[in-house]
Amino acid sequence: MTSNPACCGPDTSMKEAAKLMAEHDCGELPVVDDEGRPIGVVTDRDMACRGVAEDKNPSTPVREVMSSPAVTATPDMDLDDCCSTLEENQIRRVPVVDEKGACCGMVSQADIALHGSEHETAQLVRDVSKPSSEPSRSGCC
């Protein structure tokens, strides 16, 4: 898990979110309420597919392009449960929330690759990448 990830609020502009992603070398930001609880996530893909592709202005708030609701994990989840959450939701990253529901971390496929077995990593990538009959969570491609 990456602790204390960069987060943004629903009124953060796409431009500012993109700057945060560049500064923190990440492709997803939890979008949090005033208490730090995730209400959604915004990915670089969300901004490209729902923002740029739809001619939205860079000042557009991320609430207009974010994926919601946020799928979350907890710090006490074991690796298998975390992988299952990613696989079942076909997502590549998941915010981690503390006992109060506030965002305290992120788990990504890269974290699994660095800390899991080769088998767990391969299975995760395979399952997350399966085509589904439903549109992807980001609503794009």
Image (tube, grey):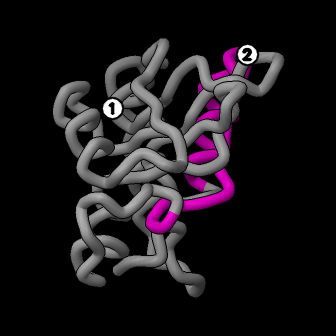
Residue in the foreground of this view, choosing between 89 and 61 = 61
Which residue corresponds to mark 1?
Answer: 110
Q: Position of residue 89 (x, y in %)?
A: 61, 58
Label 2: few (<14), some or many (≥20) within 10 Å? few
* Residue 60 position by quadrant: bottom left
Using the rendered view, name the quadrant where residue 32 is placed: top right
Which badge, 2 or 1, comes first in the chain's sequence?
2
Q: Residue at x 59, y 50 (%)?
A: 40
Against 127, residue 103 (above or below) is above
Image quarter where the C terminus lies is bottom left
Q: Position of residue 55 (x, y in %)?
A: 24, 81
Judged left or right of residue 103, residue 130 is left
Look at 31% across and 54% down and name the residue there.
Answer: 14
Image: magenta residue range? 64-87
Q: Which mark is residue 91?
A: none
Q: Check the image and report above or below for 49 versus 6.
A: below
Horizontal side, residue 12 vs residue 85: left or right: left
Q: How many marks?
A: 2
Front one among 81 and 31: 31
Q: Is residue 40 above or below residue 64?
A: above
Would residue 123 be seen by someone viewing this image from the given angle?
Answer: no
> 80 or 141: which is nearer to us?
141
Residue 115 is one of the magenta-drawn residues: no
Q: Is residue 67 magenta?
A: yes
Other-residue count near label 1 (Cα within 10 Å), few / some / many at <14 / 14–19 / ≥20: few
Residue, disc 2: 76
Under mark 1, the amino acid is Ala
Measured from the top left, where is residue 27 in percent x and y?
30, 44
Q: Secondary structure at mark 1?
A: helix
- The residue depicted at 44 percent of the width and 52 percent of the height is 42
Residue 63 seen by the camera? yes
Q: Position of residue 38 (x, y in %)?
A: 64, 39
